[in-house]
Amino acid sequence: MQASIRFPDISPELFSVTLFGMEFALRWYALAYIAGIVIGWRLAVMAVNRPRLWPGGTAPMRAEQVDDLLTWVILGVIVGGRLGFVLFYRPDYYLQNPWEIPMLWQGGMAFHGGFLGVAVAGLIWCRRNGVPIASVADMMALATPPGLLLGRIANFINAELWGRPTELPWGVAFPGAVAQSCGQPLGELCYRHPSQLYEAALEGLVLLALLIWMVWRRGALRTPWLVTGTFLAGYGIGRGLVEFVRQPDPQFISEGNPSGLALHLSGYGLTMGQLLSLPMIAVGLALVAWALRRGRAAPT
């Protein structure tokens, strides 16, 4: 019998209450978002409160301005994440059912959409407050990995976004008919890659440790755009690698496309996650090269 990671018997809901005939629940995924935002906010405040970390020994904003920026970031995450899911993953469905787009409680958020939403929100905030865009981008890049780490762990608890079938000893038998439908003999469990945990490690833990080391040990914030570029490239590479063992999104799987690829090129293919990550890797590496070449200049 194959060794495996035991799937935790944890309800996706922490608790639920019924008020006025309507049920309200706090789910692990929502808690992950909240906790990730709080941790990221504290990292940003810690960085702002240490002027020596910034170009010229001057922080780009006051700690109280971080609170105002946080409101814009939350709005960008929600709006961008939802619209990204709608446009990138299920445009046909939501074109026919547009009234379901605001129904966030039904699930469906895309990181790449959330990233674009945060970028737009941050740009508007910087223009309104006269704060250097580069410094704010670096600060937000530093604050993002905790949310990715906790969000992927919540995906694992929710038994969603699991990986392809595997015979490796750490495979997980996720519950549900869809997760168990991988062509195994009747009565045998289907073990899958815990791709959520792979992403939690690469996009969250490893990337967070790297950025903290760069900021507090190497003074990376004094080189504008270096932290942002490292985050973009690091996330794109981590996500792209995990996509090789992650189960493709069901809307891309068909009889003529059983591998679930979103793009085919001369016998090779890319999943939607890889397709969306390629621009992040390219832009990230370009920013790192440009930042290092430019040196410790003043932010623009």
Image (spheres, rainbow, N blue to C red):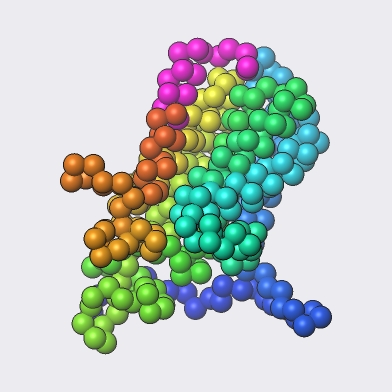
Above or below 106: residue 60: above
User: Toward which corner of the image does residue 123 lie, by quadrant?
Assistant: top right
Highlighted range, magenta: 284-300
Asked where in the image residue 20 lies, by quadrant, the reply is bottom right
Q: Is residue 137 left or right of residue 295?
A: right
Residue at 74% across, 44% down: 71
**In the image, farthest residue toward the left:** 267
Indicate whether 92 appears above or below 56: below
Determine if residue 171 is in view. Answer: no
Q: Quadrant of the N terminus?
A: bottom left
Q: In which quadrant is the C terminus drawn?
A: top right
Q: In this picture, is 76 found above or below 135?
A: below
The image shows residue 7 at horizontal and vertical percentages of: 42, 74
| Residue 177 screen position, x and y as percent | 38, 79
* Main secondary structure type of the part rendered in magenta: helix
Q: Nearer the viewer, residue 203 or 114?
A: 114
On the rendered structure, is 217 left or right of 41?
Answer: left
Quarter of the image for residue 238 reads: top left
**Identity of the residue drawn at 21% across and 45% down:** 268
Considering depth in this image, is 241 or 107 the residue closer to the camera?
107
Residue in the foreground of this view, choosing between 37 and 98? 98
Q: Is residue 94 left or right of residue 257?
A: right
Task: Identify which residue is drawn at 57% across, 36% down.
Answer: 141
